[in-house]
Amino acid sequence: MRCPACKQYGTLDALSVPDFVTPIAGTAGQVVFGQRRCPNPACRKHIFVVMEGGRVAISYPPEQLDFDSTNIPAAVRKAFEEAIECHSQQCFVASAIMVRKTLEELCRDKGATGSNLRERIQALGKNIVLPKELLEGADNLRLLGNDAAHIESQEYQQVGKEEVELAVEFAKELLKAAYQYASLLKKFDALKKV
Ligand SMILES: [Zn+2]
């Protein structure tokens, strides 16, 4: 699994504490409750796991989606980190709402104004250079969060794991375009000067 602390993938190390194993009534399966440690020498995070069928079913702290926060302003970053935290706790509706809030913060930071989020997203496309597909995707993110927040809205019948994971992936691309492409380019420029 991916370590919740350092985000590296690896096979967790066992500790010298025995696992607690309990059979699942009426089946040949069993549930294993154990303590593990991240194999990364720089991390060594202590993790509690519940395994079913040899796979991690639940862990504490829970596994989180990866996110590179380089150059992302605090208000945008905090909203998005909360979206990722909600997802890791399987609170998918709350996560969708926080993805929408991330979008709101992004518009605010980039000076994209308008009377509603739809207009602000359109303004965002004028204020910063975004591929057309990302701009259209941003509108979908808006609808997803909107639906999660307003029960009368019917655009998305249900906000589940799949919808939220897609929304998070898309939001990451949007944040990259808004904040991270420029710094990558700067790194190239810095290399040229050497
Ligand atoms: Zn780790």
Image (cartoon, helix red, strand yellow):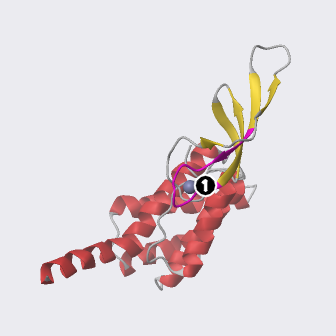
Beta carbon of the mark 1 residue lies under 8 A of ligand 1: yes
For the view shown, which residue lies furthest in the front direction? Answer: 16
Q: Going 66% across and 60% down the picture, which residue do you hit? A: 85
Query: Quick check: 167 left or right of 92?
Result: left
What residue is at 61 percent from the left and 73 percent from the top?
A: 78
Residue 91, horizontal then vertical, whole percent: 72, 53
| Residue 72 visible to an observer of this rendering | yes
The residue segment tinted magenta is: 34-45
Q: Name the residue under label 1.
A: 4
The amino acid pointed to by label 1 is Pro
Quadrant hosting ligand 1? bottom right
| Residue 118 place in picture, x, y as percent | 53, 70
Which element type, helix, strand or loop, lies under badge 1? loop
Q: Residue at x 13, y 79 (%)?
A: 192
The quarter holding residue 132 reads bottom left
Vertical position of residue 189 compared to residue 12: above or below: below
